[in-house]
Amino acid sequence: MDVQHWLLFAAAGLLLNLTPGPDVLYIVTQGMRSGARAGMVAALGITAGCFVHIFAAALGVSALMAASATAFSVLKWLGAAYLVYVGIRMVLARAPSEGDQNAMYSIANNNRNTSATALKSLFFQGFWTNALNPKVALFFLAFVPQFITPTIENKPLAFLLLGLLFNFNALWVNIGWALAAAWMARRLGALQRGMYKLERVAGVMFIGFGLNLALSSPPKP
C-alpha cells in the first residue's frame, strides 16, 4: 500500500470511530458518571475487545462466521444477552441521595477514589461489549479488504496491520470521548446528580442495541 491508501484508510477509520454506537455510549456514560479515569479504562476495554475481532478476521475466523449462520447466531445471542445485561445494570444503578456528599465529591473530582476492582469491572464490561458483538467482526471483514490491493502477497499480514492501525486510532478517539464526557460532567456542577438519570437512559439504549442485535439476520453467503 502507498502512503495515499494509508491516509485514506486512517481518515475513513477516524470518521467511523466518531460515529456514536454501543461502544461510544458505554465510554461516555462511564466518563460522565465516574470521571475521566473510569471513562479511559472503559475505552481501553473497548479497544482490547476490538483486538479479538482484528486477529480473528486476519486468521479467517470472521470469514467462517460470515459463511455460517450457526456460528453467527451463537455469537449474536451471546452478544445480545450481554448488551441487555449491561443495560439492565445501568437502569437499576442506585442514584445517590441528596445528602450523599461523598458520592458527589467523587464525581466532581474525576472519581479519584475509584477502586481497582471497580476499574477492572469497567474494563471487562467494555471488553465483552465489543468482543461479543458479531457486527464488529463482520465490519472488519467488509471494511478493511477494500484497502488491500490485489497485488499484495501476504494479505493476512496486510489485514492485521490495517486492523491494528484502525484500533490504534480508535483508542485516541475513545479516550477523547471519555475526557469530553468527564469535562461535561464537571461543568454541570450541581446537575451532576442527573448523570445517574443519564445512565438509566443509556441503559435503555443498551437494551435496545441488544434487542436489535438479537433480531438481526445472519449474513448472506
Image: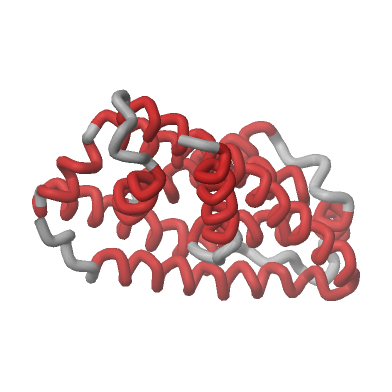
**Quadrant including the C terminus:** bottom left
Horizontal and vertical percent for residue 120?
A: 59, 35
Residue at 29% over, 25% down: 153
Query: Seen in the image, is 171 located left or right of residue 57?
Result: right
Query: Seen in the image, is 28 located left or right of residue 9?
Result: right
- Between 108 and 217, the one lying in front of the other is 217
Horizontal and vertical percent for residue 31?
A: 71, 55
One can see residue 202 in this view = yes
Residue at 72% over, 69% down: 195
Horizontal and vertical percent for residue 11?
A: 59, 53
- Between 42 and 95, the one lying in front of the other is 42
Quadrant of residue 218 within the rendered picture: bottom left
Residue at 62% over, 54% down: 27
Quadrant of residue 128 within the rendered picture: top left
Horizontal and vertical percent for residue 30?
A: 65, 55
Q: How many marks?
A: 0
- Between 166 and 98, the one lying in front of the other is 166
Q: Is residue 24 above or below residue 5?
A: below
Query: Seen in the image, is 128 located left or right of residue 170?
Result: left
Colour logic: secondary structure
Q: Is residue 197 above or below residue 37?
A: below
One can see residue 121 in this view = no
- Between 64 and 160, the one lying in front of the other is 160
